[in-house]
Image: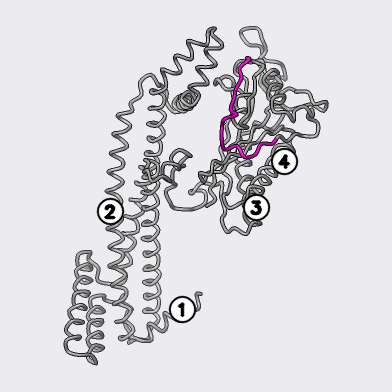
């Protein structure tokens, strides 16, 4: 099934990243970074099914070569914390053929980036694991009309109320930075994410698929469901092999809860609509002059029992006895339920339904909060464990950075996977924690276990709410049969009203 995933990030030298290294990995090629002399060889990487460079009209033709393009970026950017490239990775719809997927990425890149003057280098990865996706690398510095790199921004003086420059205590004048392109506008993230959904959906429609993707969150779309966790390639592969993962278990629990909540809400809405129709028909039904009262449910249940007894007379004595026993059991359960909940009229039944609905909503909200925290804890635990496990490997690499170039390159190549995991963990932990000197992983795991236990308890409560609604559905059936026998015109009026509403 087509899924929506579109992530935007920056390749920054300040975070130890290299545009050449990123391009080599995405394309599965061997590239040498002329800025630091490091060679990045990913020719043995599998799953790269297509690579392509797209350029605006004024870009130098030599930029069609991957090494030339990204080394030009690396050499022009002098700062140690320079932002070298922007990257977008997005899931591709599996309903599209490979050629359609390539055309989709081309159209997206052409309309959103190349037309604005950016150089684009994209790659499509697919390891036949059900997760085809694309990596799109974008240049962040504009090109002038001659194809030379131009300034990203300029400084402007801050002025006081008299239009004079403001002098600082240091003797310099106060300035602020002004971007010379709109590429860094924060609003672009939403526009680019929406464009990916829109263009993907147009290709899905043309391919005759009914699947659609949406860039909006469940809350923005008005979907009252707990969102599932993004599984990732590793977890998906393990699940395909029949190995249960924590992410998979969490997603299965979320889907189960969502189905139960949806079922409860649908049944409650259906019952409330039925009660509203009955009450409206009851008020307009012809009767002796008296204030209209809500039907008494106990009387209707007894009426139902007499109707069923009358119907059973045409059958054998043994069948009548068995049928009477079954009906008495049904009526007994219904009467007990109504007595326990203090319900005697349709109005009170409607109020009880509202109460069940509010309770289910409250449970759902609690589960939603818990699931969100569990997702966060999962990421913290996973990245915390990777950070601690591979920290010695990173520390050893740091020792080799001072000289021993050959030795360092060989060590980095031999431990590339571990270093990649450590770097990813380090970035995540620094972004989400104020202090990573001590990582309370055992505390996170305990909190996760507690939340999991609470979620199971809440799910049991939801099942109890569903059982209540199921009991009310049985009562509805009895009441409908009794009303039909007692006041046929009431049922007819309600049926007519229903047809008119439709």
Q: Position of residue 314 (x, y in %)?
A: 24, 92
Label 1 residue SS: helix
Tag nearer the camera, 2 or 4: 4
x, y percentage for residue 171? 65, 7
Q: Nearer the viewer, residue 126 or 454?
A: 126
In front: 337, or 454? 454
Q: Residue furthest right?
A: 146
For the residues bearing labels 2 and 3, Cβ distance under 8 angstroms: no
Figure quadrant of residue 276? bottom left
Which residue is label 4 attached to? 110
The reply to whether discs 1 and 2 touch (Cβ–Cβ < 8 Å) is no
Verify CB contact (< 8 Å) between mark 3 and mark 4.
no
Instruction: Based on the picture, tell me whether residue 246 belongs to the magenta stretch.
Output: no
Is 259 placed above or below 60 here?
below
Distance between mark 1 and mark 2 Cα atoms = 36 Å
> In x, y percent, where is residue 381?
37, 31
Calculate the distance from the C-alpha at mark 2 to the C-alpha at mark 3.
Answer: 43 Å
Q: Which residues are magenta?
A: 36-52
According to the picture, the residue beneath numbered tag 3 turns out to be: 203
For image coordinates 31% across by 33% down, the residue present is 445
Q: Among all residues in the image, which is located at the extreme bottom?
A: 314
Q: Is residue 171 left or right of residue 451?
A: right
Q: Earlier in the sequence, mark 3 or mark 1?
A: 3
**Label 4, residues with CA under 10 Å away: few <14, some 14-19, many ≥20:** some
Mark 2 / mark 4, whichever is N-terminal = 4
Numbered disc 3: secondary structure: helix
Looking at the image, the residue that sits furthest to the front is 44
In contact (CB < 8 Å): disc 4 and disc 1: no
* Label 3 – label 4 distance at C-alpha: 15 Å
Q: Which residue is mark 1?
A: 497
- Please give the residue where the numbered disc 2 appears in the rendered image: 461
Seen in the image, is 377 located left or right of residue 73?
A: left
């Amino acid at each position: 099934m087509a899924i929506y995933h579109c992530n935007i990030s920056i390749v920054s030298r300040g975070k130890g990243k290299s545009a050449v290294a990123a391009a080599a990995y995405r394309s599965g090629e061997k590239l040498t970074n002329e800025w630091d002399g490091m060679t990045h060889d990913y020719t043995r990487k599998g799953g790269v099914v297509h690579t392509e460079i797209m350029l605006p009209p004024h870009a130098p033709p030599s930029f069609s070569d991957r090494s030339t393009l990204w080394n030009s970026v690396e050499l022009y950017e002098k700062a140690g914390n320079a932002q070298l490239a922007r990257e977008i990775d997005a899931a591709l719809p599996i309903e599209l053929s490979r050629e359609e997927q390539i055309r989709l990425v081309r159209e997206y890149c052409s309309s959103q980036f190349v037309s604005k003057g950016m150089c684009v280098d994209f790659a499509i990865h697919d390891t036949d694991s059900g997760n085809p996706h694309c990596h799109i690398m974008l240049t962040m510095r504009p090109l002038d009309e001659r194809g030379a790199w131009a300034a990203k921004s300029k400084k402007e003086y801050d002025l006081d109320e008299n239009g004079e420059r403001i002098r600082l205590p240091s003797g310099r004048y106060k300035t602020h930075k002004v971007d010379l392109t709109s590429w860094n506008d924060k609003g672009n993230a939403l526009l680019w994410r929406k464009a990916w959904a829109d263009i993907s959906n147009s290709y899905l429609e043309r391919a005759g698929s009914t699947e659609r993707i949406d860039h909006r969150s469940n809350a923005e779309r008005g979907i009252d469901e707990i969102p599932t966790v993004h599984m990732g390639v590793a977890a998906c592969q393990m699940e395909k092999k029949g190995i249960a993962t924590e992410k998979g278990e969490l997603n299965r629990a979320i889907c189960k809860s969502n189905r139960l909540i949806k079922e409860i809400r649908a049944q409650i809405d259906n019952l409330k609509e039925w009660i509203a129709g009955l009450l409206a028909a009851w008020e307009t039904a012809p009767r002796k002059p008296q204030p209209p009262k809500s039907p008494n449910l106990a009387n209707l249940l007894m009426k139902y029992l007499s109707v069923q007894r009358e119907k059973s007379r045409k059958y054998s004595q043994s069948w009548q006895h068995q049928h009477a026993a079954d009906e008495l059991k049904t009526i007994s359960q219904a009467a007990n339920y109504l007595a326990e909940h203090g319900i005697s009229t349709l109005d009170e039944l409607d109020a009880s339904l509202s109460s069940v609905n509010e309770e289910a909503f409250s449970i759902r909200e609690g589960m939603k909060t818990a699931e969100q925290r569990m997702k966060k804890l999962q990421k913290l635990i996973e990245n915390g464990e990777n950070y601690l496990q591979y920290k010695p490997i990173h520390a050893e690499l740091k020792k080799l950075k001072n000289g021993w170039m050959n030795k360092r390159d060989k060590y980095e190549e031999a431990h590339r996977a571990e270093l990649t995991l450590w770097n990813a963990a380090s970035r995540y932990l620094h972004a989400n924690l104020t202090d990573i000197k001590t990582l309370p992983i055992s505390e996170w795991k305990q909190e996760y276990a507690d939340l999991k236990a609470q979620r199971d308890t809440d799910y049991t409560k939801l099942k109890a709410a569903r059982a209540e609604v199921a009991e009310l559905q049985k009562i509805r059936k009895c009441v409908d049969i009794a009303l039909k026998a007692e006041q046929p015109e009431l049922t007819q009026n309600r049926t007519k009203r229903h047809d008119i509403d439709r």
